[in-house]
Amino acid sequence: MTDTQTANLRAAARELHDAGLCVLPIKADGTKKPAVSWLQYKVTRTTPADHDGWFGGDRPRGIAVVYGKVSNNVELIEFEGLAIREGLLDEATEIMDAAGPQIAEAWHAILNGWVTESPSGGRHYRVRVEGGDVPGNTKLASRLAREDEYTEADHQRLRERPTARIVRVLVETRGEGGYGLVEPSGGTVHATGRPYVRLAGGPDAIPVVDADTMAAIRNHCRMLDQLPQPEAPRTAPRPAPPRADGSLRPGDDFEARADWADILGGVFRPMTTRGSETYWGWADGVGGVKATTGRDEHDRLFVFATGSEFQAEVPYSKFGAYALLNHGGDHKAAARELARQGYGSRRLAAVGAPSPSPAPAPEQPDADETPVEEDQEEQGDEGGREGFDYAATFDLPATVRTPYDYRVTGRGVEVLSTSGENWLRVTFAPLVITATFEDPEGDQYVELSWIDRSLAGRPRRISRIVSRETAKRGRKLIETLGSAGLPAVEGDARAVEKWLAEFEAANFGRIPSEQLARWLGWQDDGTFVSSPEDGIKVDTPFEEQRGPARAHARKGTLDGWRDTVAQLEGFPVPRVAVAAALAAPLLKPLGLNSFTLDISSRSTKGKTTALQVALSVWADPSEHASAMSNWRTTLYAIEKRLNLVRGIVTVFDETMAVTDDTLIDEVLYQLPMNHGKARSGGAFGNMLPWETILLSSGERPALSFTTSQGAAARILGTTIAPFGDSGGPAAAAAREGVLANHGHAGPEFIQYILSGLAQPNGRDKLAEHHRRLVDEFRGGGDMTNRRAPMVAVLVLAETLACGRGLLPYEPLSHDVWRGLFTAHNPTDNRPDMALDVVREYVAGHAHELYSTTRAAMGERPPFSGWLGVLSTKDGATEVALLPERVRKILAEAGYSLDAVVGSWIDAEYLKTLKSQRPPHLVPRRFDGARAKCLAFTPEGMPYGDQDDAA
């Protein structure tokens, strides 16, 4: 961003702020998305200090205004570029002028206020609403896209769903909770590269319009809508097939001959006509345009206002309107009266002709005659709406009602047929929406609940949360929830999606609405969800995540947990693991990537217990809970497990349990990327995000599984036994204590962190504390310097937790931390890791070692040849391996024999003979041959009882 752009954006932000508007920064990547987490700015206006931070520096940005109450009730009316090109702005002005002086005056004030031209050629108008709330973002007018307007995405959608409607929005608003870009945003802020341009006025020229007039203006803009509207049988009966004798039904005859002015007299009066379309206002002359007729060849009545017998936004035929106004919507009574008035033609028999024989069954009713049996009408329209006990069955408020034309019974949901004669099944059990949700990103979800009777005699309620998009697509809904027992079949998909939409619309404001989290930890709005017990509904996107999410629960007390970890004071490694658990939520505010803490040793003393103590900061660490994971799994399962958290520790135990070494290699490499790797057909193909510190343990260092030379910089590892040689009782007590007390420390710590971040410059102070620690832990080597930020965040977490009193001991000295991670670290020693690879290979291929016992038994050499020779002298067993076989084993694991053999000699892992050249290749005889081998000492290659002792 140039100095000029910075100055322009700062000046624009100041101008907008001075006018009482809430300002947002926008990403300069063509997405028009906010550059910051902005949910809080829907209710709290941004400050000049925020603006200086956002619009300074060299990052390109756009600028936007949040509309609604936070900006003193300002609302945006947007005419898209398509609407401008098609003359809809002029048409809207004609409608407003015809609506009377009050609406016309307000409309022209809006047109002459603050006006912006968007990059697509649209027009943005702002208005301050007085005396009422600003509604949310609303689409006022749209039309179906023409084929020549289809984008590639539209074509793809039609290939997937041939019946889909491709819609182009023409007029919409940005209201409560919405935002819109303003000038001088330009460049890469918009996908076209063109700028937003001010055409007139400015933030100080926003006209003020009262809420009632503004509601009328929105309704008048709705008259520009060109989308085909579905016609309900009760308001616009479907045409019936012609009678066999050619006679006309009364309703058909009335539709052809009647005039709208005669039908609507006393309710509406004609105001103006444009082409075939007539605009109608109230008969008493109050207000502006309230309805239209003649919009298309069907000549339907569309009412845009409430306050009359007509439903708003519903098309009425002439017969439907007549039946409503004169017979309360009773089509059968209306048809009889029209026949009495002479509409329609009678079936006349020839003089002298015999009377027709009685029909064996009653004649089917005409389409414009909708008889309903009285018992069905009572059960469906009244008993079904009020008789079903939603409160007792689904814990819904007692005010919840069944929509018109539906009934709900223990057998399921049914809808009245178009003829009104019978009930058609929609579902095979009661199915309703029991809650609606919105996550911090603004995505919406609904909770569907139904009664399941698959267990004989034991009906039960089942609930599942799905996205609103899924709920609106019946086939996708049935596919998604079919395995959960959704009581519907694919053939009823459209009926199910319509039922759910009708049920929610009929109970707007009655169905509970809640906040939803899709993962644990940091949310996009800056809040932190530690557990499903925090009062926020947690619904994970994958079934496999449900168990681990539920395991993040509380048990016992915080004091009980403190008493337990007090026993760790003399054991640095378990304390480091606890510090890592507390450090996980600090990654986000400090801008650090995920990393791994690996605890490995050949001892069996306390590695798993150390991980359990760390996990107890947030979750149940017991084996039967799902928070404690094992490396014996798949990459895809690991990705889903990591995806569960954003700022909470993740635990994987027992590296030796892995079935494929490349799995650990892939995880260690990808973890700091904070998302899965996109590769064709790969296990990480979904690129699921995460943010965590991964705690790993095993007899073999995690680094020994990777061939990546840079992996050591992304891993902190220690080979020190967590509880030493004599810490067995302490380990047992720690394990018992955290099983009884867990899930308290993490939520307590994050509340402390959140309160600190909320203070003035709180985030900067935290970052400065971390920077000082990073400088302190930097050293002379590149590896130490690269690890310093990771060590520093662990030290910072322990320091803060001790200062808060969460940890009942003094922080570890910095010298202890240096000794563990920043000085020479055993896990950096690739020679040791290479030797571990050879040891593992020998343990799994002992049958390839030649011995005198095998020779005495006459065993033949293995297919791949002898690996080496096994011999015993003075009670000590020696393993000597052929160097070329060792070279190949190491090469396959990513190590070079030449690079590590010198260190093996220095560590006295290999026997040497000064008389040999080179001295570490010692001659050994086996199977009648003599060969130079790598002869390992018992320390280098323990075997049999020696291995157990080691």
Image (spheres, grey):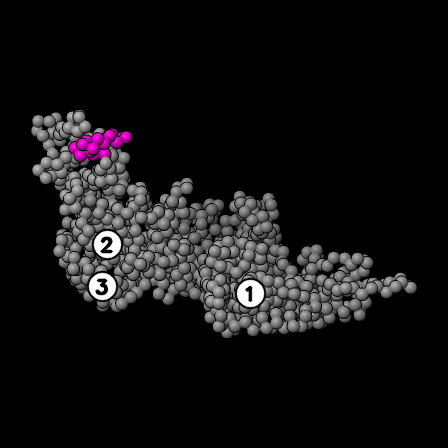
* Among numbered discs 2 and 1, the one appearing first in the sequence: 1
* Among numbered discs 2 and 3, the one appearing first in the sequence: 2
Residue 936 picture location, percent across and down:
14, 36
**Dot 2 corresponds to which residue?**
608
Amino acid under label 3? Answer: Gly
Say if 80 sits above or below 99 in the image: above
Residues at marks 2 and 1, CA–CA distance in whole angstroms: 51 Å
**Dot 3 corresponds to which residue?**
737
Q: Residues within 10 Å of mark 1 (few under 14, many from 20)?
A: some
**Residue, far front:** 857
**Dot 1 corresponds to which residue?**
412
Amino acid under label 2? Answer: Thr
Q: 399 or 281, which lies in front?
A: 399
Residue contact between numbered discs 2 and 3, judged by CB atoms under 8 Å: no
Residue drawn at x 27%, y 41% is 706
Q: Residues within 10 Å of mark 2 (few under 14, many from 20)?
A: many
SS at mark 3 in the image: helix
Query: Is residue 851 in view?
Result: no
**856 in the magenta segment:** yes
Amino acid under label 1? Answer: Gly
**271 in the magenta segment:** no
Query: Is residue 243 in view?
Result: yes
Q: 679 or 910, which lies in front?
A: 910
Residue drawn at x 59%, y 50% is 163
Q: Which residues are magenta?
A: 848-867
